Amino acid sequence: MDMIMKKAMFGAGCFWGVELAFRRIEGVADVAVGYSGGEYPNPTYRDVCTGRTGHAEVVEIDYDPAKVSYNRLLEVLWSIHDPTTPNRQGPDVGTQYRSAIFTFDAEQAAEAEASKQAEDASGRHRRPIVTEITPASTFYRAEEYHQRYLEKNGRASCSIH
């Protein structure tokens, strides 16, 4: 029996830590870091860092829905970043670090909206959630040195503490 894989795409600040968090989830087959959500074609990391491309740093996730639900991926997303800070995650500031859910179909869009509302109502956040939910656009894979960056450099997180 062949696996039927699905895709998810999220922005939650610097993509290195986000990638690592999702790689640890059983049922996730692959995670790639890249850029999406802007108008600038074929952006490089340098382009995206200017804040003028409209792209966010994102992870594109290939997952097996028989092993992990989209809702579970959303739960992980909420747990690994602050969805209440527009265009910022910790020390990283700019539109490329925005909190975003890029959906691939109507079912994902509905689940994302319901999950966002539930997270907002949970009382875990002192401010309202500002995460954007929009249809997925072109994913531009980041340069190879960004893929599995933390693993390649023997780091368990991108924490700067």
Image (spheres, rainbow, N blue to C red):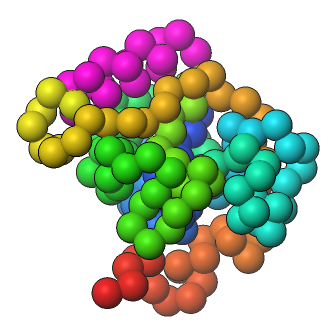
Q: Residue at x 22, y 42 (%)?
A: 127
| Residue that extends furthest to the right in the rendered view of this protein | 41
Question: x, y (%) of residue 26?
Answer: 37, 50
Magenta stretch: dominant secondary structure = helix
Determine the image quadrant of residue 50.
bottom right
Question: x, y (%) of residue 73?
Answer: 38, 39
- Residues 20 and 123: in front is 123
Question: x, y (%) of residue 83?
Answer: 35, 45
The number of callouts visible is 0
Q: Is residue 119 left or right of residue 60?
A: left
- Residues 125 and 58: in front is 125
- Residues 79 and 4: in front is 79
Residue 150 seen: yes
| Residue that extends furthest to the left in the rendered view of this protein | 123
Question: Residue 2 in magenta?
Answer: no
Question: x, y (%) of residue 91?
Answer: 44, 72
Quadrant, the N terminus: top right
Q: Is residue 151 left or right of residue 22?
A: right
Q: Residue at x 90, y 44 (%)?
A: 41
Q: Residue at x 42, y 36 (%)?
A: 131
Quadrant, the C terminus: bottom left
Q: Residue at x 57, y 39 (%)?
A: 9
Residue range of the region highlighted in magenta in the rendering: 105-119
Determine the image quadrant of residue 69.
top left
Residue 69 seen: no
Is residue 80 positioned above or below 122 on the image? below
Is residue 1 positioned above or below 95 on the image? above
Is residue 145 positioned above or below 37 on the image? below
